[in-house]
Image (spheres, coloured by chain):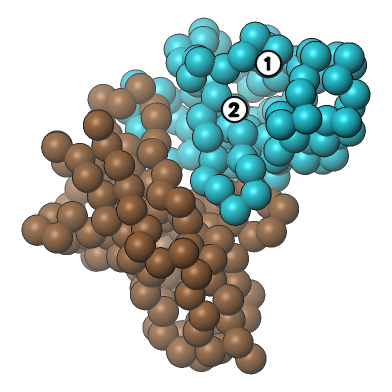
Chain colours: A brown, B cyan
Protein backbone atom coordinates (compact mmCIF):
# COMPACT_ATOMS: atom_id res chain seq x y z
CA UNK A 1 0.00 0.00 0.00
CA UNK A 2 1.15 3.50 -0.69
CA UNK A 3 1.31 6.26 1.89
CA UNK A 4 2.41 9.87 2.19
CA UNK A 5 3.72 11.73 5.21
CA UNK A 6 3.95 15.48 5.48
CA UNK A 7 5.85 15.94 8.73
CA UNK A 8 5.07 19.64 9.17
CA UNK A 9 1.47 20.43 10.06
CA UNK A 10 2.03 24.18 10.04
CA UNK A 11 4.88 26.35 8.75
CA UNK A 12 5.26 30.11 9.10
CA UNK A 13 7.70 32.05 6.94
CA UNK A 14 8.31 35.73 6.34
CA UNK A 15 7.45 37.21 2.98
CA UNK A 16 10.49 37.06 0.74
CA UNK A 17 12.05 34.17 2.64
CA UNK A 18 12.68 30.78 1.10
CA UNK A 19 10.36 27.84 1.67
CA UNK A 20 10.71 24.09 1.82
CA UNK A 21 7.77 21.78 2.50
CA UNK A 22 8.60 18.17 3.21
CA UNK A 23 6.97 15.10 1.77
CA UNK A 24 7.93 11.49 2.33
CA UNK A 25 6.24 8.64 0.53
CA UNK A 26 6.10 4.92 0.83
CA UNK A 27 5.58 2.87 -2.30
CA UNK A 28 7.22 -0.29 -3.61
CA UNK A 29 7.55 0.66 -7.26
CA UNK A 30 8.23 3.93 -9.04
CA UNK A 31 5.78 6.46 -7.66
CA UNK A 32 3.97 9.20 -9.45
CA UNK A 33 4.20 12.27 -7.22
CA UNK A 34 2.19 15.47 -7.08
CA UNK A 35 1.97 18.69 -5.12
CA UNK A 36 -1.37 20.47 -4.91
CA UNK A 37 -2.26 23.79 -3.29
CA UNK A 38 -5.62 24.72 -1.81
CA UNK A 39 -6.66 28.22 -0.85
CA UNK A 40 -9.38 28.54 1.81
CA UNK A 41 -12.78 27.37 0.55
CA UNK A 42 -11.39 26.46 -2.87
CA UNK A 43 -10.56 23.32 -4.79
CA UNK A 44 -7.07 21.92 -5.19
CA UNK A 45 -4.73 23.21 -7.88
CA UNK A 46 -1.85 21.18 -9.26
CA UNK A 47 1.52 22.84 -8.66
CA UNK A 48 3.75 20.19 -10.23
CA UNK A 49 4.12 16.50 -10.89
CA UNK A 50 6.82 13.88 -11.23
CA UNK A 51 6.42 10.73 -13.30
CA UNK A 52 9.97 9.99 -14.49
CA UNK A 53 13.08 11.63 -15.91
CA UNK A 54 14.73 14.71 -14.46
CA UNK A 55 14.37 14.55 -10.69
CA UNK A 56 14.08 18.33 -10.34
CA UNK A 57 10.71 19.45 -11.61
CA UNK A 58 9.47 22.95 -12.14
CA UNK A 59 5.91 23.95 -11.49
CA UNK A 60 3.65 26.93 -11.57
CA UNK A 61 3.95 30.03 -9.38
CA UNK A 62 7.72 29.64 -9.07
CA UNK A 63 7.62 26.32 -7.20
CA UNK A 64 9.95 23.40 -7.77
CA UNK A 65 10.32 19.97 -6.22
CA UNK A 66 13.08 17.39 -6.14
CA UNK A 67 12.51 13.64 -6.21
CA UNK A 68 15.04 11.76 -4.11
CA UNK A 69 14.51 8.04 -4.40
CA UNK A 70 17.13 7.19 -1.78
CA UNK A 71 15.29 9.30 0.78
CA UNK A 72 11.76 8.54 -0.46
CA UNK A 73 11.17 12.27 -0.53
CA UNK A 74 9.61 14.84 -2.82
CA UNK A 75 10.12 18.19 -1.11
CA UNK A 76 8.58 21.38 -2.45
CA UNK A 77 10.64 24.56 -2.59
CA UNK A 78 10.25 28.19 -3.47
CA UNK A 79 13.13 30.70 -3.28
CA UNK A 80 11.02 33.71 -2.27
CA UNK A 81 7.57 33.41 -0.76
CA UNK A 82 4.78 35.88 -1.53
CA UNK A 83 1.85 36.66 0.79
CA UNK A 84 -0.47 35.05 -1.77
CA UNK A 85 1.28 31.69 -1.23
CA UNK A 86 -0.45 31.32 2.13
CA UNK A 87 -2.57 28.18 1.70
CA UNK A 88 -2.79 24.46 2.41
CA UNK A 89 -0.33 22.28 0.52
CA UNK A 90 -0.92 18.60 -0.17
CA UNK A 91 1.58 16.05 -1.41
CA UNK A 92 0.07 13.05 -3.20
CA UNK A 93 1.36 9.75 -4.56
CA UNK A 94 -0.05 7.53 -7.26
CA UNK A 95 1.22 4.81 -9.56
CA UNK A 96 1.23 3.64 -13.12
CA UNK A 97 -1.41 1.00 -12.53
CA UNK A 98 -3.36 2.34 -9.62
CA UNK A 99 -6.78 2.81 -11.19
CA UNK A 100 -6.47 6.56 -10.98
CA UNK A 101 -6.27 6.70 -7.21
CA UNK A 102 -4.00 9.16 -5.46
CA UNK A 103 -3.10 8.99 -1.79
CA UNK A 104 -2.88 12.41 -0.18
CA UNK A 105 -0.78 13.50 2.75
CA UNK A 106 -2.47 15.29 5.64
CA UNK A 107 -1.32 18.64 4.33
CA UNK A 108 0.87 21.51 5.52
CA UNK A 109 -0.63 24.90 6.30
CA UNK A 110 1.59 27.76 5.19
CA UNK A 111 1.29 31.12 6.92
CA UNK A 112 3.21 34.08 5.45
CA UNK A 113 4.21 36.91 7.78
CA UNK A 114 4.46 40.41 6.31
CA UNK B 1 -10.02 25.12 -21.11
CA UNK B 2 -8.67 23.48 -17.95
CA UNK B 3 -11.65 24.26 -15.79
CA UNK B 4 -13.89 21.98 -13.80
CA UNK B 5 -17.11 23.64 -12.73
CA UNK B 6 -19.35 22.66 -9.85
CA UNK B 7 -22.83 23.77 -8.88
CA UNK B 8 -24.11 24.87 -6.50
CA UNK B 9 -21.35 26.59 -4.55
CA UNK B 10 -23.24 26.25 -1.29
CA UNK B 11 -26.07 23.94 -0.31
CA UNK B 12 -28.04 23.68 2.90
CA UNK B 13 -30.35 20.72 3.19
CA UNK B 14 -32.39 18.97 5.81
CA UNK B 15 -31.98 15.32 6.64
CA UNK B 16 -35.13 14.38 4.69
CA UNK B 17 -34.30 16.36 1.55
CA UNK B 18 -33.13 15.10 -1.82
CA UNK B 19 -30.62 17.23 -3.66
CA UNK B 20 -27.98 16.84 -6.35
CA UNK B 21 -24.49 18.19 -6.89
CA UNK B 22 -23.31 18.76 -10.44
CA UNK B 23 -19.88 18.76 -12.01
CA UNK B 24 -18.80 19.48 -15.58
CA UNK B 25 -15.51 19.39 -17.49
CA UNK B 26 -14.71 20.04 -21.13
CA UNK B 27 -11.13 18.84 -21.25
CA UNK B 28 -11.94 15.53 -22.88
CA UNK B 29 -10.98 13.71 -19.71
CA UNK B 30 -12.26 10.17 -19.35
CA UNK B 31 -11.97 9.85 -15.58
CA UNK B 32 -14.02 11.79 -13.05
CA UNK B 33 -13.95 11.70 -9.28
CA UNK B 34 -15.95 12.71 -6.23
CA UNK B 35 -14.13 13.59 -3.03
CA UNK B 36 -15.35 14.60 0.42
CA UNK B 37 -13.20 17.00 2.40
CA UNK B 38 -13.60 17.93 6.04
CA UNK B 39 -11.96 21.05 7.45
CA UNK B 40 -8.19 20.80 7.86
CA UNK B 41 -8.15 17.31 6.30
CA UNK B 42 -7.07 15.93 2.93
CA UNK B 43 -9.70 14.99 0.36
CA UNK B 44 -11.20 11.53 0.82
CA UNK B 45 -11.97 9.64 -2.36
CA UNK B 46 -15.60 8.58 -2.70
CA UNK B 47 -16.12 7.46 -6.30
CA UNK B 48 -14.20 7.12 -9.55
CA UNK B 49 -15.80 6.97 -12.98
CA UNK B 50 -13.75 5.66 -15.87
CA UNK B 51 -15.19 6.01 -19.36
CA UNK B 52 -18.59 6.79 -17.82
CA UNK B 53 -18.63 3.59 -15.80
CA UNK B 54 -18.27 3.44 -12.03
CA UNK B 55 -14.89 1.88 -11.37
CA UNK B 56 -14.30 2.62 -7.70
CA UNK B 57 -16.73 3.03 -4.80
CA UNK B 58 -14.83 3.53 -1.58
CA UNK B 59 -17.55 1.93 0.57
CA UNK B 60 -19.61 5.09 0.51
CA UNK B 61 -23.06 4.91 2.20
CA UNK B 62 -25.97 4.46 -0.20
CA UNK B 63 -27.38 7.86 0.72
CA UNK B 64 -24.78 9.12 -1.77
CA UNK B 65 -25.58 8.04 -5.33
CA UNK B 66 -23.26 9.02 -8.19
CA UNK B 67 -24.27 9.29 -11.82
CA UNK B 68 -22.28 9.96 -14.98
CA UNK B 69 -24.74 10.90 -17.76
CA UNK B 70 -21.96 11.50 -20.29
CA UNK B 71 -18.22 11.98 -20.48
CA UNK B 72 -18.44 15.65 -19.45
CA UNK B 73 -20.94 15.47 -16.60
CA UNK B 74 -20.89 13.97 -13.15
CA UNK B 75 -23.67 14.17 -10.60
CA UNK B 76 -23.89 13.22 -6.95
CA UNK B 77 -27.41 12.58 -5.71
CA UNK B 78 -27.97 13.10 -2.01
CA UNK B 79 -30.78 11.65 0.08
CA UNK B 80 -31.42 11.31 3.79
CA UNK B 81 -28.05 12.73 4.74
CA UNK B 82 -26.74 13.05 8.27
CA UNK B 83 -25.21 16.14 9.91
CA UNK B 84 -21.78 14.45 9.78
CA UNK B 85 -22.04 14.52 5.99
CA UNK B 86 -21.55 18.27 6.10
CA UNK B 87 -18.32 18.95 4.21
CA UNK B 88 -16.78 20.37 1.06
CA UNK B 89 -17.52 18.07 -1.88
CA UNK B 90 -14.95 18.23 -4.62
CA UNK B 91 -15.20 16.97 -8.15
CA UNK B 92 -12.08 16.25 -10.18
CA UNK B 93 -11.19 14.92 -13.59
CA UNK B 94 -8.11 13.39 -15.15
CA UNK B 95 -7.00 12.12 -18.51
CA UNK B 96 -7.88 8.53 -17.72
CA UNK B 97 -8.21 6.23 -14.75
CA UNK B 98 -6.03 3.30 -15.78
CA UNK B 99 -3.13 5.13 -14.25
CA UNK B 100 -2.69 8.03 -11.88
CA UNK B 101 -2.61 11.19 -13.91
CA UNK B 102 -2.76 14.64 -12.41
CA UNK B 103 -6.23 15.66 -11.40
CA UNK B 104 -8.03 18.91 -12.09
CA UNK B 105 -10.34 19.96 -9.28
CA UNK B 106 -13.44 22.05 -9.24
CA UNK B 107 -13.99 24.73 -6.57
CA UNK B 108 -16.27 22.45 -4.58
CA UNK B 109 -19.76 22.55 -3.12
CA UNK B 110 -19.97 23.47 0.55
CA UNK B 111 -22.71 21.23 1.94
CA UNK B 112 -24.40 21.81 5.28
CA UNK B 113 -26.87 19.21 6.57
CA UNK B 114 -29.24 20.50 9.24
Left or right: B35 with respect to A100?
right
Q: Which residue lies at the image location 35% right of the left edge and 22% below the top edge?
A: A99
User: Quick check: B47 above or below A110?
Assistant: above
Q: Residue furthest left?
A: A70
Gap between marks 2 and 1 measured at Cα: 11 Å
> In which image quadrant can residue B108 be found?
top right
Left or right: A70 with respect to A87?
left
Q: Nearer the viewer, residue A112 or B32?
A: A112
Q: Residues within 10 Å of mark 1 (few under 14, many from 20)?
A: some
Looking at the picture, how far across and down is residue A113, in whole percent? 60, 87
Can the viewer see residue B9?
A: yes
Disc nearest the viewer among 2 and 1 = 1
Q: Which mark is residue B34?
A: 2
Q: Which residue lies at the image location 70% right of the left edge and 19% below the top edge?
A: B76
Earlier-in-chain disc, 2 versus 1: 2
Can the viewer see residue B50?
A: no
Q: Residues within 10 Å of mark 2 (few under 14, many from 20)?
A: many
- Say which chain tag 2 marks: B
Element type at marker 1?
strand
Q: Which mark is residue A27?
A: none
Q: Which residue is mark 1?
A: B64
Labels 2 and 1 touching (C-beta < 8 A): yes
User: Quick check: A92 above or below B113?
Assistant: below
- Say which chain tag 1 marks: B
| Count of numbered marks | 2
Q: Quadrant of the C terminus of chain B?
A: top right
Q: Which residue lies at the image location 45% right of the left edge and 12% below the top edge?
A: B55
Q: Mark 2 vs mark 1: same chain?
A: yes
User: Quick check: B103 above or below A49?
Assistant: above
Element type at marker 2?
strand
Q: Which residue lies at the image location 53% right of the left edge and 71% below the top edge?
A: A110
Looking at the picture, how far across and down is residue A62, in whole percent? 45, 73
Amino acid sequence: AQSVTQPDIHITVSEGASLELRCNYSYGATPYLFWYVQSPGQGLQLLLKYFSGDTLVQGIKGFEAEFKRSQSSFNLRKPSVHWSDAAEYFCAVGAKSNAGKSTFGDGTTLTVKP
Amino acid sequence: DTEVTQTPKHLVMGMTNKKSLKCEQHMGHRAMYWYKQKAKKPPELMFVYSYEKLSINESVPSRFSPECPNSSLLNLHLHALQPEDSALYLCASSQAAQTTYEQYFGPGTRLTVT
